[in-house]
Image (cartoon, grey):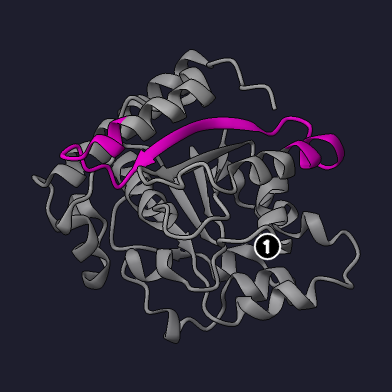
Amino acid sequence: MTKTVAICNQKGGTGKTTTTVNLASALAALGKKVLIVDMDPQGNSSSGVGVNKNEVKESLYDVLIHRIGTAQALIKTSYDNLDIIPCNINLTGAEIELVGVLSRETRLKKALESIKNNYDFIFIDSPPSLGLLTLNTLVAADSILIPIQCEFYALEGVSQLLNTISLVKDGLNPELHIEGVLMTMADFRTNLTNEVIGEIKNYFKDKVYNSIIPRNIRLSEAPSFGKPINFYDNASIGAVKYKELAEEFLINNAASKKPLSI
């Protein structure tokens, strides 16, 4: 069965897009059929896999607002097993345009139904906010993966996100659960990184991935070339760690870990 995972944290700069692109690409390289849904109006997941978002004729905006067939907006990337539904700045307007729409929270979920069974995994890159676009993401998802950076204010806003997840579970998506918590931007030269990792593990218990993504210049460079890290520099520590994460992700799903209560 297809699993839809929202990559979500309303705090900006946590590595959502980096994780969406590189986890999806690593899984595709392992033979899984993967779709990225770019729900962030900045469109960085789109450009991160080589799609020129300024030249996209039909995007996620058209799917959500104009109700075009989802397959019309879907683009096959240059990488085997990896497709994307791209977006561009037009998606910014969807936040406002959806306000008066009937069943506005379920637009994305319904849009994905026609193509969902073509994939093993669907990853939704959500915007750094808790508006209607993120709400659509959480309603469409089976689970949520939360990237948290190894910085002083790491848990800032997480309680608000967990409250939103709880509200969505109560009213719109009772099966939604936390897939895992990923520590990003780790710098093991500092005591702070180890302190933050300890704090996150104490809070989220066994939902924290063993794989930790370090600060890595090659990870920062890859998007400007429109390539996931495993195609930009497969020997880099960033590529190695996202491959490890992909393998851990698959093991966890095979083991069907108990969802974290919220």
Magenta span of residues: 166-194
Q: Assign a secondary structure to mark 1.
A: helix
User: Measured from the top left, where is residue 68 in percent x and y?
Assistant: 69, 72
Left or right, 188 with respect to 97, comes to left
Q: Is residue 30 visible?
A: no
Q: Residue at x 32, y 37 (%)?
A: 31
Q: Nearer the viewer, residue 233 or 82?
A: 233
Q: Residue at x 23, y 61 (%)?
A: 220
Q: Residue at x 37, y 54 (%)?
A: 21
The stretch drawn in magenta includes residue 24: no
User: Measured from the top left, where is residue 29 in percent x and y?
Assistant: 27, 42
Q: Nearer the viewer, residue 187 or 136?
A: 187
User: Measured from the top left, where is residue 41 in percent x and y?
Assistant: 55, 72
Amino acid identity at mark 1:
Leu
Residue under circle 1?
Answer: 133
Q: Residue at x 52, y 78 (%)?
A: 88
